[in-house]
Amino acid sequence: MRVELANISYKINKKSLIENICMNINPKEFVGLIGPNGSGKSTILKCIYRVLKPSNGAIFFDGQNITELSIKESALKVAVVVQHNFTSFDFDVLDVVLMGRSPYKRLMEADNKNDYDIAHQALVIVGLEGFSKRKISTLSGGERQRVIIARALAQKTPCLILDEPINHLDIKFQLQTMDMIKKMNVTVIAAIHDLNIAATYCDNIYAINNGRIVAQGKPAQIFTTEFIHDIFGVQAKVETCSETGFVNILYRNV
Amino acid sequence: MENYKDIYQLKYNTPLFIIMLILIVALVLSMFIALTLGTTDISTKKILQLFSDILKGKESSNTPLYDVIILLRMPRIILAVCIGMGLSVCGVVMQAIVRNPLADPYILGISSGASLGATAAILLGIGLSFGENYVGFSAFLGAMIVAFLVLLIGNLGGSSSSVKLLLAGMALNAVCSAFSNFIVYFAGNMEGMQSIAFWMLGSLAGAEWSNLAIIVPITLLIIFFFYTQARIFNLMLLGDEIAITLGRDMRSYRHIYLLLSSLLVGFFVFVAGMIGFIGLIIPHITRMLIGTDHKQLIPISAIVGGIFLLWADILCRSLLPSTELPIGILTSLIGAPCFVYLLAKKTYGFGGDN
């Protein structure tokens, strides 16, 4: 799915959180948003997945303005993986994954065999086969995160939005998760803190600082010693790995 | 290795069906047993005889047996089941609306609104023109006014969130209690204060066929409506933002649910005063048994609640030889130990991180 952001801004109490954001994301592109805490990455993503309404500008899914889509129709196009707590109520893992099927359902419609198959596949993909009947409260942080990813997969959308998708995962699952998402062959828009992960998996990077896009391009173009210092204020050494061809970033000090 | 097809079969067919069946049988049996118990125990045989007489169209309406069974016990039993069901489901609904396991049907200020209404009626005679049950009527009005105010305040300065609703409820709670206390303090009416206390503890003695004709259909309709919304309640527990990413905007839903459950609780307050605790514990007990999925939680907690309140009322009627125990005392007295037992026995962390 093609996603376009045309000049969007979001203001709260006259303070701009993001300003004049333009993006053009091609179908099946893996796009990374990087930037320091509070730079506006999550705000941009929230505008795309419709929790926030941009004060200015417009967002298009495959050329269609999202204001013309109902919330339910949007949920058929975009699935979201975002950190959240499961509040004070305990669900079975399978129940949570099945919620990914909600946008396909009319109110009274029960989950059918097909929905169960899809939910089961999603659990297999994230490596939680056999966890269906477990309570969410008995899972580790990483396992919970994978349940949320499974729910997004069960949504079967042409676009995935990920806000810090791998924060709670150990390194093996970070890589496995990113591999898995890459293989989904859908449009991906992800806010990523780990620059090495971003450099390895993203086709295109948008660097955000103070609510504006400050750079855009392929990882190899974006990540330079000066750039990392300018944006994050840290010293780093940037190398290109001779074996994989990926950019490696080694941090020195502040 | 588990087979997910078995889970599909199991979870959504067999146990729910069996549990429902057992519970419904238990409910019907309890209702029948309740008919036999009371200040005078009446044998099963006599009751069956009475029913068959009525079915055959025999004139039997002037016998004392008919009066006790048909005019006294039956309405009361039906009312108990009805209120038990309604309060339990409203408890489930309120807990989902405010995303807080401590919520009960009265939490959003409804209780204090109702008691202000009742206090004003008893001590100041407000609403005397509403007829015989003017206390119930003022309480109903008080509850509904507070429910609307909670929604109104919750929506001030931006759209409502569950926390805002909860805080608005607490603020109104304080205001209403202050007014009630003010009235009680300056009225200096001991007799009135006693009847307020009695009213606050709840009683099913006011059951009559005429008010059942309204309350039963409304209760069943609203419970059925909430049952159809099970999917929304599940999403509600994940929070507004997540719900949007799954295709539903919770704000409008929350308002409708809040008004409907306030309406239902208002009706219950009208006929039976306030019956505490049941709307808090039955949802939890049911969750311990079958989990959080509202598709099962709503129907099963309804039936469990019906059975619970029915037995509570049976005990109220028969425990003390000469007088009747207020039902609010009994629901807490039986409910709390059951609850503690379940808490200790099963690992039920209220879903929190433990």
Image: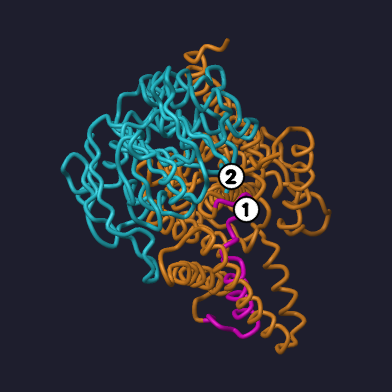
Chain colours: A cyan, B orange
Which of discs 1 and 2 lies nearer the camera? The answer is 2
Q: Residue B322 occupies which quadrant of the picture?
A: bottom right
Q: Determine the secondary structure under disc 1.
A: helix
CB-based contact (under 8 Å), mark 1 and mark 2: no
A181 or B342: nearer the viewer: A181
Q: Is residue B121 above or below residue A149?
A: below
Residue drawn at point x = 77 percent, y = 82 percent: B190
Which quadrant would residue B242 be assigned to in this image? top left
- Quadrant in which the N terminus of chain A is drawn: top left
Quick check: do tags 1 and 2 share a chain?
A: no
Identify residue type, mark 1: Leu
Whether residue B110 is in magenta: the answer is yes
Q: Which residues are magenta?
A: B99-128
**Residue A108 left/right relative to B227:** left
**Residue corresponding to mark 2:** A253
Q: Nearer the viewer, residue B229 or A250?
A: A250
The residue indicated by pointer 1 is: B72
Residue drawn at the location 59% of the way across and 29% of the way down: B25
At label 1, counting other C-alpha atoms closer than 10 Å, the crowd grade (few under 14, some 14-19, many 20 or more) is: some
Task: Please say if B288 is above or below B66.
Answer: above
Is residue A104 something that shows in the picture?
no
Residue B182 inside the magenta-drawn segment? no
Asked if one can make out residue B152 in the rendered structure from this viewpoint, the answer is yes
Identify the residue at the far bottom of this view. B186
Which kind of residue does numbered mark 2 sit on? Asn
Mark number, residue A80 = none
Is B38 positioned to the left or the right of A242 in the image? right
Image point (26%, 41%), residue name: A73
Other-residue count near label 2 (Cα within 10 Å), few / some / many at <14 / 14–19 / ≥20: few
Q: What secondary structure is found at the residue carrying circle 2?
A: loop
Q: Residue furthest left?
A: A63
Instruction: Report x, y in % for residue A128.
Output: 53, 21
